[in-house]
Amino acid sequence: MTAYIIRRILWNIPVLIIVGFITFGIAKLTPGGPFDTQPERRQLSPRVEAILRERFGMDLPFWRQFTRYMFLDIVPDPKTGEWKIQWGAIAGNLGPTYSSRGARTVQQELFEGTPTRPSKFYYSARLGVQALIFAVVFGIPLGVLAALRQNTWLDYLLSLSSTIFVALGTLITSLILVIIFAVILNWFTVIPDWNDPVKPWILPTVALGTTSMAFIARLTRSSVLEVKRQDYIRTAQAKGLAGQVIVWRHMLKNALLPVVTILGPALAGLITGTLFVETIFQVPGMGRTFVDAISKRDYSMIMAGSLIYVFFLGIANLLVDIAYGVLDPRISYK
């Protein structure tokens, strides 16, 4: 198990490099730059822009820009003048933000909070984890219930509801929740108070988790129906085992394998921020930051968004593979 985990972690390194190269290339090929795509800021003179481009290494060849950002660069120490190694993104240094003209780093922008407010990463990560827990806790039981009551009114109701929520998506679901619970019923405020540890999290968690919950419910139903027809289930029923024992010990473990497969990408996507939900509910997370970075050509922030997503995707998929072995002992890690 330990050797398998180490191999999987090491395999994530070339994946990060390839994704970083593709993202960096697309960002550089896109017209415009970080110093001419912000109309709200005073236009820079050609001389100042040239100084900034040289400061950020934008006058270097493409391969040099990528290697110094992704791997390392040898730079002089501003105090002693001695040359030293400056590690890149592969070592956790995501670089300065172009939108701040280098005054702040990506780490400070995403991972540092204030005495009164946590970091943007905290808001996105907490919201994503809460939404996934909500989706799993409600989606799996509803899917199992629909499968066990196949072709009954309950099955039709659950299937119809899950289809509607999948079709609506997070944007429409968020707007509906705001209109009903914040405007009509006035149970929540339109402008949330994030100093409250519970109340402002409820609506965005439900909005973000509802679509995933509906998808998980549909997938669970289909998987349970398939497992339900297997010979070993009929054998367990013929032996006279209790219905709950058959469902929880024999049926659900095998039926959950397809469900667990989608949880990895779902978790990575939810943690790195969902623009619609964070915008509608004014969540101070990473979603808006990454979208703004694209419009401003903030290359280091764009790269950070891609690398953070791939990093969490790799970790989540590793956890999924480990969960396979827990659910099905026949799966080997060798």
Image (cartoon, rainbow, N blue to C red):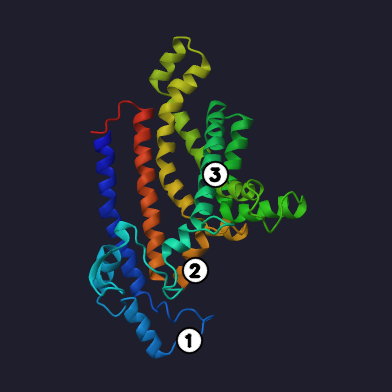
* The image quarter in which residue 57 lies: bottom left
Camera-side mark, 2 or 1? 1
The amino acid type found where label 1 is placed reads Gln
User: Decide: marks 1, 3 in contact (CB < 8 A)?
Assistant: no
State whether residue 228 appears in this view: no
> Mark 3 or mark 2, which has the lower sequence index?
3
Disc 2 to disc 1, C-alpha distance: 18 Å
Residue identifier under label 3: 130
Q: Which residue ends up furthest to the top in the rendered image?
A: 239
Q: Which residue ends up furthest to the right in the rendered image?
A: 185
- Along the line of sight, which residue is nearer the eye, 135 or 157? 135
Residue identifier under label 1: 43
User: Decide: marks 2, 1 in contact (CB < 8 A)?
Assistant: no
Q: Position of residue 111 (x, y in %)?
A: 46, 57
Residue at 38 percent of width and 49 percent of height: 313
Disc 3 to disc 2, C-alpha distance: 25 Å
> Mark 2 or mark 1, which has the lower sequence index?
1
Residue at 56 percent of width and 29 percent of height: 145
Q: Position of residue 39 (x, y in %)?
A: 51, 81
Residue 117, above or below 202: below
The amino acid type found where label 3 is placed reads Gln
Residue identifier under label 2: 292
Label 1: how many residues lie within 10 Å, few (<14), some (14-19) or many (20+)?
few
State whether residue 177 appears in this view: yes
- Along the line of sight, which residue is nearer the eye, 13 or 31? 13
- Numbered disc 2: secondary structure: helix
Disc 1 to disc 3, C-alpha distance: 43 Å
